């Protein structure tokens, strides 16, 4: 398997799926819709919808319903980035090599664009009720996705992250940092894999294993992000490096050091792949995708 070729092909398919769900730019709300679409179609690796779809296929899923959820989870991820880039948060001017939404449209429209993407994600996911899939699966997947992205997941993690800013590192406990990483980053990856499994009809035992795999990958992904913020370049990442240090954020690297951070990425990765191999199905691309997420350079 040529992983890079397969990745490019799948990314192109996901781009088409996402673009098919874009709202029309019209009426008095056209500016915010334009900002939503600018944000959503701003590139990126489309990791979360890809993980969702590959997990769905691993367990034999075939319904078009998955496309509604793939678009929805990318909308959720994108809205979180739009808000994260705002001056009141990380105040970043670039993402994925181009101007952030607030830098183009202003703070107010960017805020509304993020709100719009979150709301439209719900509308989009609920559209799966009109497809051929079992309604119970749709309901369960919707609940998982919005629980993992809400106050008990991503938003909760982002809140703790904001409150930790500027505090001396000795005041940031390992437990708090672990909470931030699990909720801010890992929760949405959990949502992707778990929703894909639920839509394919997996039982709760498999669902719990998927959650564990995704949590490990999400933690390793975030630790690697902290590593890249120290060792990466603007050309690699498409955004300024060192923003965590500038914003006074405690990170895994700043607390544990670079070498332990790299070792923990390795340990989390190995456990995730081991758990993936416990399933009867086989999806070599999914395994390589998980590895590429964890050991990425951008």
Image (spheres, rainbow, N blue to C red):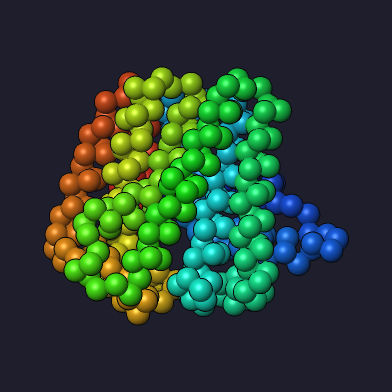
Q: Is residue 130 left or right of residue 12?
A: right
Which residue lies at the image location 28% right of the left edge and 44% below the top edge? 216
Which residue lies at the image location 62% right of the left edge and 66% below the top edge? 111
Residue 296 in the image, given as x and y percentages of width and height: 33, 58
Residue 121 in the image, given as x and y percentages of width and height: 62, 46
Which residue lies at the image location 79% right of the left edge and 63% below the top edge? 30
Q: Is residue 264 above or below residue 228?
A: above
Q: In the picture, which quadrant includes the N terminus?
A: top left
Q: Residue lying farthest bottom?
A: 246
Residue 295 in the image, given as x and y percentages of width and height: 28, 55
Q: Nearer the viewer, residue 119 or 168?
A: 168
Which residue lies at the image location 33% right of the left edge and 62% below the top edge? 225
Q: In the picture, which quadrant includes the C terminus?
A: bottom left
Q: Is residue 60 above or below residue 38?
A: above
Residue 29 in the image, given as x and y percentages of width and height: 79, 62
Q: Nearer the viewer, residue 144 or 95?
A: 144
Q: Nearer the viewer, residue 56 or 198?
A: 198
Q: Is residue 176 left or right of residue 30?
A: left
Q: Is residue 276 above or below residue 261?
A: above
| Residue 150 in sight | yes
Total tally of numbered discs in the picture: 0
């Amino acid at each position: 398997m040529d992983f890079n070729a397969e990745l490019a092909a799948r990314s192109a398919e996901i781009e088409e799926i996402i673009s098919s769900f874009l709202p029309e730019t019209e009426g008095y709300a056209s500016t915010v819709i334009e900002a939503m679409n600018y944000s959503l179609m701003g590139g990126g690796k489309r990791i979360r919808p890809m993980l969702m779809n590959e997990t769905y296929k691993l367990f034999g899923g075939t319904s078009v319903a998955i496309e509604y959820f793939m678009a929805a989870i990318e909308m959720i991820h994108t809205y979180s980035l739009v808000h994260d880039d705002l001056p009141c948060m990380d105040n970043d001017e670039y993402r994925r090599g181009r101007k952030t939404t607030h830098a183009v449209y202003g703070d107010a429209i960017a805020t509304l664009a993020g709100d719009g993407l979150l709301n439209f994600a719900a509308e989009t996911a609920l559209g799966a009720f009109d497809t051929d899939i079992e309604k119970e699966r749709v309901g369960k997947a919707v609940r998982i996705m919005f629980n993992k992205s809400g106050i008990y997941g991503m938003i909760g993690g982002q809140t703790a992250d904001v409150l930790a800013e500027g505090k001396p590192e000795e005041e940031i406990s390992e437990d708090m940092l672990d909470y931030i990483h699990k909720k801010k980053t890992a929760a949405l990856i959990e949502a992707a894999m778990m929703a894909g499994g639920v839509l394919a009809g997996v039982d709760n035992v498999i669902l719990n294993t998927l959650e564990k795999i995704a949590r490990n990958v999400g933690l390793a992904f975030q630790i690697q992000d902290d590593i890249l913020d120290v060792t990466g370049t603007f050309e690699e990442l498409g955004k300024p490096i060192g923003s965590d240090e500038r914003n006074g954020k405690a990170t895994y690297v700043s607390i544990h050091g670079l070498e332990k951070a790299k070792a923990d990425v390795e340990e989390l990765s190995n456990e995730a792949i081991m758990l993936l191999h416990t399933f009867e199905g086989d999806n070599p691309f999914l395994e390589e995708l998980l590895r590429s997420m964890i050991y990425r350079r951008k």
